[in-house]
Image (cartoon, grey):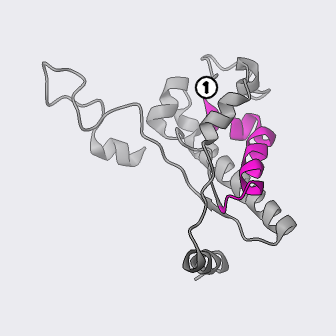
Amino acid sequence: MNQRIGQLRTLLRRRIAILDGALGTSVQDLDLTESDFRGERFADWPRDLKGNNDLLCITQPERVAAIHREFLLAGADIITTNTFNATAPSQGDYGMEERVGEINLAAARLARETADRVTGETGVPRFVAGALGPTNRTASISPDVNDPGLREMTFDELADA
């Protein structure tokens, strides 16, 4: 058992752990522009990227880190990674399916670094949990009422995403 798991178990034996707040809503409150989402790296990307909150871990990491920090300083014990839509099906809307691994890794590192920084400043252990939201494709309900067996993707494709 590593040290963090031990610290988390100790915390959970003492009290209920506090999870962060609505990361996506906090990002929306920043009122970012298309250019903000793109950053320099994706300035010439062929599709709109505004709304791709997960990409901000690459293009605007300091803004995402600031949100994580606010939640931690407000009393959150656990922050969630900015990966709610960091799956291939969801990133497909932006043409970024091939960037999913990079986005997830950047988000996890950013959350971990921020939690470690606040832990060092406060002496209170902070934790990171991965976030996985629903995809924008369905594997359980047909998108066509005339073909009840039709699926936008199979369960195997969803698991691979």
Residue 87 forms part of the magenta stretch? no
Counting from the top left corner in percent of width and height, residue 98 is at 55, 36
Where residue 123 sits in the image (x, y, percent)?
Answer: 82, 72
Q: Residue at x 16, y 20 (%)?
A: 145
What is the quadrant of residue 2 in the picture? bottom right
Does 130 sit left or right of 55 as displayed? left
Residue 126 or 73: which is nearer the viewer?
73
Query: Does the magenta segment cover residue 73?
Result: yes
What is the three-letter code of the residue carrying label 1? Gly
Decide if residue 161 is on the left or right side of residue 65: left
Taking depth in this image into account, of 68 and 158 the one nearest to the observer is 68
Indicate whether 17 appears above or below 148: below
Tell me the quarter of the image containing the N terminus: bottom right
Residue occupying the far front of the picture: 15
Q: Is residue 50 left or right of residue 100?
A: right
According to the picture, the residue beneath numbered tag 1 turns out to be 51
On screen, 33 above or below 106?
Answer: above
Which corner quadrant of the image does residue 73 belong to? Answer: bottom right
In the rendered image, the quadrant that contains the C terminus is top left
Name the image quarter holding residue 95.
top right
Stretch of the chain drawn in magenta:
51-77
Secondary element at tag 1: loop
Q: Residue, x 52% and y 38% (percent of image)?
A: 85
Q: Residue at x 13, y 23 (%)?
A: 147
Q: Where is residue 134 in the image (x, y as percent from the top left)?
A: 42, 40
| Prevailing secondary structure class for the magenta stretch in the rendered image | helix
Q: Where residue 94 appears, x then y in whole percent? A: 55, 25
- Residue at the extreme right of the image, as rendered: 121
- State the residue at coordinates (56%, 68%): 16
Task: Count residues near mark 1 (Cα–Cα under 10 Å), then give few for <14, some for 14-19, many for 20+.
Answer: some
Total residue callouts: 1
